[in-house]
Image (spheres, helix red, strand yellow):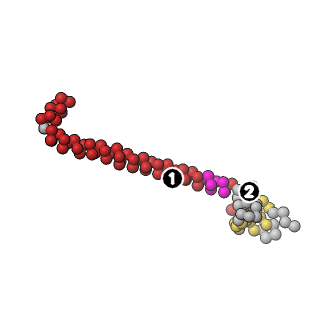
């Protein structure tokens, strides 16, 4: 088989060269365009997964510091994201949506 190819190349060099140019160009296209593009797509998917993981961690951290409490004077329930004054947020929430083991009753006199 290989001898036949060599004979053909020697007998018809112009035809063989004209056939080999598209082959070489095709190989170069695969090496320099298609393979890097696939790697880039894989990298993009990896970055998206990493970002989703980061967002999930941030959400979990925020949820874990939420504190639910009830004002005994008004019977209203609230949620706060912390007990410090400089960055705390406060929102009213329905009391019946808070599990009893998560609800603190404020000690107001």
Does any portion of residue 79 appear in the rendered image? no
Residue at point 49% right, 48% down? 46
Callout 1 environment at 10 Å: few (<14), some (14 to 19), or many (20+)?
few
Q: Quadrant of the N terminus?
A: top left
Magenta-span inclusion, residue 60: yes
Magenta-span inclusion, residue 47: no
**Residue 102 - label:** 2
Rendering coords of residue 73 (x, y %): 82, 69
29 to the left or right of 98: left
Disc 1 versus disc 2: distance between alpha carbons?
34 Å
Q: Which residues are magenta?
A: 57-62
Rendering coords of residue 60 (x, y %): 64, 54
Nearer to the camera, 41 or 91? 41
Nearer to the camera, 67 or 16? 16
Mark 1 lies on a secondary structure that is helix
Choose top left, top right, bottom left or bottom right for residue 108: bottom right
Residue at point 18% right, 44% down? 18
Mark in the foreground, 1 or 2: 1
Nearer to the camera, 9 or 42? 9
Q: Earlier in the sequence, mark 1 or mark 2?
A: 1
Residue at point 20% right, 30% down? 2
Does any portion of residue 40 appear in the rendered image? yes
Callout 2 environment at 10 Å: few (<14), some (14 to 19), or many (20+)?
few
Name the residue carrying label 1.
48
Q: Measured along the vertical axis of the image, is residue 53 above or below residue 69?
A: above
Rendering coords of residue 71 (x, y %): 79, 66
């Amino acid at each position: 088989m290989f001898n036949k190819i060599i004979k053909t190349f020697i007998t018809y060099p112009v035809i063989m060269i004209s056939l080999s140019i598209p082959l070489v160009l095709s190989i170069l296209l695969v090496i320099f365009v298609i393979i890097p593009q696939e790697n880039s797509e894989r990298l993009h998917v990896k970055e998206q997964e990493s970002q989703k993981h980061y967002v999930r961690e941030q959400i979990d951290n925020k949820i874990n510091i939420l504190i639910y409490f009830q004002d005994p004077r008004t019977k209203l329930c609230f949620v706060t994201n912390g007990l410090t004054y400089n960055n705390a947020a406060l929102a009213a929430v329905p009391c019946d949506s808070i599990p009893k083991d998560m609800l603190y009753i404020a000690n107001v006199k």
